[in-house]
Structure formats: C-alpha cells, structure tokens
Image (tube, helix red, strand yellow):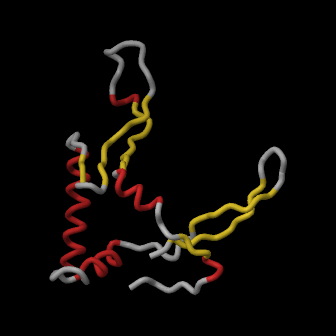
Amino acid sequence: MAILFNKVPRKAPKSQVAKFYVVPKMVKLANLRDISKRVAKNTTMSPQEVEMVLNSFVEELQTMLLDSYSVRLGDWASFHVTVNSAGSDTKKDCTPLLIKRVNVRCMFSDEFKERMQHAEWVDAGKVHTTDPQ
C-alpha cells in the first residue's frame, strides 16, 4: 500500500516565486459498491450483503446524529454535529433560526492518524496505476 503523489508548482502570492509541492494523487473515487466488494473478500458475506450492511450503517449513523448522539466507532473515529450560527443579544432570541450551517465532524483516532503519518509515498509519475481489486 502506498499513497501516490504528484509534484505541483505553486507560486507564492507575494514573491511570485514558484516552488514544487507534494500533492496526493487520487487514482479513482471508490464508492460503496467498490468497498463492499473488497470487504466481502475477507468475510463469508456476499458483496451485496456487505453493501446492505454499510448502507444500513450510514442510515443509522445519520439517525443517531439527528437524535443528538455523538458516535464513536471503536479505535477508528468519532462523529458529532457542530453548527455555525449568528449570535443573539438575549437568551430568548437565541433560536435555531440563527443557524447558518450544520456540519458533521469526523475526528479520527490518534492510532488512525499515526498510521497515516507513516504511509509510504510513491511518485505517481514513476508508476503505472490500475484499479485496486
């Protein structure tokens, strides 16, 4: 496993001097069906059964967040809702009408983030990429 990267030139706004930066390269956008096929290889479930479980998981996660729960998924991540809202001068005037945006935050565990910090990086210009199966 390795994360592919490209070397991209970007100019500094003030000096207009270009420097090269490492930018992760996306090979393909994996969808739920792709993940289901890969998970099914390690279980006794069919890809369709895995996909059904994952869809149910997403629905339940949304329901729990809508019911004011924070959701922790073992040592992987936790999810919670935050909002951006305008302020009010009085407690009485502080209503949901002041909410500008609702956000769902995913906080990954330290273990997960540590694993990503130690990822292998490979120059995309030096490899031929194919779909992972």
The quadrant holding residue 75 is bottom left
Query: Tag count in the figure?
Result: 0
The quadrant holding residue 33 is bottom left
As drawn, is 68 to the left or to the right of 86? left
Q: Position of residue 50 (x, y in %)?
A: 21, 75
Q: Which of the two residues, 111 or 104, is positioned nearer the viewer here?
A: 111
Q: Quadrant of the N terminus?
A: bottom left
Residue for point 46% across, 72% down: 29
Q: Which of the two residues, 59 or 27, is positioned nearer the viewer here?
A: 27
Name above or below for residue 130 compared with residue 31.
below
Name the residue at the top extreme: 90
Residue for point 35% across, 18% down: 93
Residue for point 44% across, 22% down: 87
Name above or below for residue 128 compared with residue 70.
below
Name above or below for residue 69 compared with residue 7.
above
The quadrant holding residue 66 is top left
Name the residue at the front extreme: 118
Q: Quadrant of the C terminus?
A: bottom left
Q: Position of residue 24 (x, y in %)?
A: 57, 66
Q: Position of residue 43 (x, y in %)?
A: 19, 80
Q: Position of residue 112 (x, y in %)?
A: 36, 57
